[in-house]
Amino acid sequence: MKIDSIQNGVVLDHITAGMALRVYKDLGLDKFDCSIAVLQNVKSNKMGKKDILKIDKSYDINLDVLGYIDPNITVSIIRDGQTVEKKKLALPQKLINIKKCKNPRCITSVETDIPHIFKLTDEENRVYRCIYCEADK
Ligand code: ZN
């Protein structure tokens, strides 16, 4: 399968097969009016199968959101048809307004104007805890 390569934009590669639509949604790409190619179940030597997203627009991608979904995704910045930069992802130490605390007794469910902040407490198991109530969901 061949898709026209983009001239200026962002390519997200090595997305775990089946996760492309979640990445699409979590990055808010549905609000974009540029062309976006979602490739699913692409053959990969390294992964067997993978998903790829190609976004035909230059923009600052939220690397914390991506790192939280999957730190193994590779991000390539394309300008004039060439890859000019590859960004490395890591599990973010802090999530700010990326996920909401679901504890009904948490202060964030009462005070709606304070930010939702989660801290990485267990890197291996990817556990994040709310900094206000310590809930891990
Ligand atoms: Zn909380």
Image (cartoon, rainbow, N blue to C red):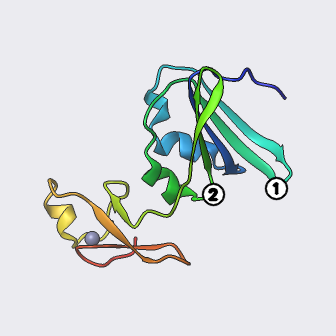
Q: Is residue 107 left or right of residue 84?
A: left
- Indicate the secondary structure of the residue bearing disc 1: loop
Q: In 3D space, how far apart are the residues under numbered discs 1 and 2 (Cα atoms)? A: 12 Å
- The residue nearer to you, when weighing 120 against 9, is 9
Tag shown at residue 46: 1
- The residue nearer to you, when weighing 47 against 79, is 79
Question: Mark 1 packing: few (<14 Cα in 10 Å), some, or many (20+)?
Answer: few
Position of the N terminus by quadrant: top right
Residue 129: image location, x then y, percent: 36, 74
Tag shown at residue 72: 2
Tell which quarter ligand 1 is in. bottom left
* Residue at x 46% of width, y 49% of height: 63
Tag shown at residue 31: none
* Residue at x 16% of width, y 58% of height: 114
The three-letter amino acid code for the residue at tag 2 is Asn
Residue 42: image location, x then y, percent: 80, 41
* Residue at x 49% of width, y 33% of height: 29
Question: Mark 2 packing: few (<14 Cα in 10 Å), some, or many (20+)?
Answer: some
Q: Is residue 124 above or below residue 40?
A: below
Going from N to C along the chain, the mark reached first, 1 or 2, is 1
Count of picture labels = 2
Q: Are the two marked residues, 1 and 2, in contact with CB atoms closer than 8 angstroms?
A: no
- Indicate the secondary structure of the residue bearing disc 2: loop
Residue 124: image location, x then y, percent: 56, 78
Q: Is residue 113 left or right of residue 18?
A: left
